[in-house]
Amino acid sequence: MKSIDLTKEKVVTVADLAAAQADTTELLVGENAVLTPSALEFTEQRHITVRRGAKAAGVEKAASATGAGAIQELFHSPAAEAVKEEICAAGRKLWQRQYVDGNGGNISCRIGPNEVICSPTLMSKADLRPEDLCLVDLEGKQLAGGRPRTSEILMHLEIYKQVPEAKGVVHCHPPHATAYAITGRVPPTCVIPEAEVFIGKVALSPYETPGTPQFARTVIPFVKDHNTVLLANHGIVCWADTVTHAEWYAEVVDTYCWTLMLAAQLAPVSHFTSEKAADLLAIKKRLGLPDPRHELKECELCDLPEPGSIAIQPKPCGTAPSLNNAEIDAIVQAVTDRVMAALNARK
Ligand SMILES: [Zn+2]
């Protein structure tokens, strides 16, 4: 095993890799170092493992995983085998609850600073066995496992990079939450305590072609402040401290969306008060669950949708809500209609 230490470089170019030789298997770079596309390609072609933040060795078990032998040892360690069982169990639950069809959905677990176990591509989540799972690094390069990794792992990896607390990620297509995602709406808050405590506000990320790096990046603005993101015209993604908990969140959010749809057929949905929402946030804080609303004033805790509305337009992160052309046209039309009606009434 031979490694190149470039931990002092902020940007690693292909020229920096000139020292690589035929037996080079590992490149050590700083936690936040940027590899140029050609440098990444160089490492991929030569099967060189890129190890980030290697100076932090000892923080987590995987930090000691250097070289092919150690990677295999990590991938088959008792801790990793337990994670594989957990991923398979979550996959069966997703399939049983009809949140994944065909080979849809994917699951992953971060087991080290640079190592993630994930489901393979083109397999039903009902049929996953521990030996089907893959090990990838944070750049998506497959380190171990006989089957090719899911193409949607790139989205999971963006979440792990953005949110250090995230250890498990579940992506699926549950029908009720996905129905919201295809209408560009999110469920309101302050309706059901369980959804409030475990999910809180739900975000909506813009549509991109699944499996692409652009798709992976769509979740970046949302995942720090939301554990559940609706993926426009696609499905949902949830992160948590474990795979099991991320799968629970998928269940909670889909049941919440379903219940809202059922309730709306009976009568307008009622909301509990911001004061009661503050009680739930206190419980959430005690459970150690993050929520950006911990920092807000009580009066800001609940979304206030139109009375009876079960679907609200999400606000873009940090900016005022923007209207699309169809919405502007609708407003112009509504104003014109009222003016014309008033003029006609005067005749
Ligand atoms: Zn998908």
Image (cartoon, rainbow, N blue to C red):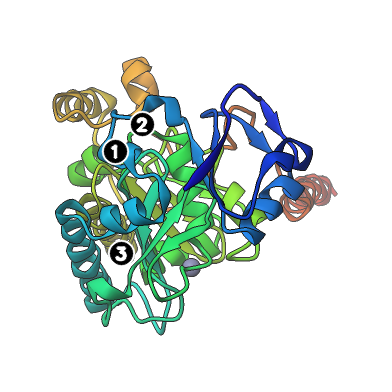
Q: Position of residue 217 (x, y in %)?
A: 60, 47
In the foreground, 70 or 244: 70
Question: Which of the 4 image quarters holds residue 6?
Answer: top right
What residue is shown at x 27% (from left), y 74% (from top)?
131
Q: Amino acid at mark 1?
A: Cys
Mark 2 surroundings within 10 Å by alpha-carbon count, few (fewer than 14), some (14 through 19), many (20 or more):
many
Disc 2 element: loop
Query: Compared to 200, does 248 lie above or below?
Result: below
Question: Which of the 4 image quarters holds residue 176?
Answer: bottom left
Which of the two discs, 1 and 3, labels the residue nearer the N terminus? 1
What residue is shown at x 46% (from left), y 68% (from top)?
149
Query: Compared to 169, does 10 lie above or below?
Result: above
Query: Compared to 172, does 35 lie above or below?
Result: above
The mark found on residue 258 in the picture is 3
Q: CA distance from mark 3 to mark 2?
A: 20 Å
Q: Can you see residue 253?
A: yes
Disc 1 element: loop
The mark found on residue 302 in the picture is 2
In the foreground, 2 or 235: 2
Q: Position of residue 37 (x, y in %)?
A: 73, 48
- Asked if the residue under mark 1 is in contact with the one under mark 2, i.e. CB atoms within 8 Å, the reply is yes
Q: Position of residue 267 (x, y in %)?
A: 29, 58
Q: Amino acid at mark 3?
A: Trp
For this view, does 162 lie left or right of residue 80? right
Q: Position of residue 32 (x, y in %)?
A: 56, 29
The mark found on residue 234 in the picture is none
Q: CA distance from mark 2 to mark 1?
A: 6 Å
In the foreground, 230 or 320: 230
Q: Amino acid at mark 2?
A: Cys
Q: Can you see residue 312?
A: no
Residue beneath disc 1: 190
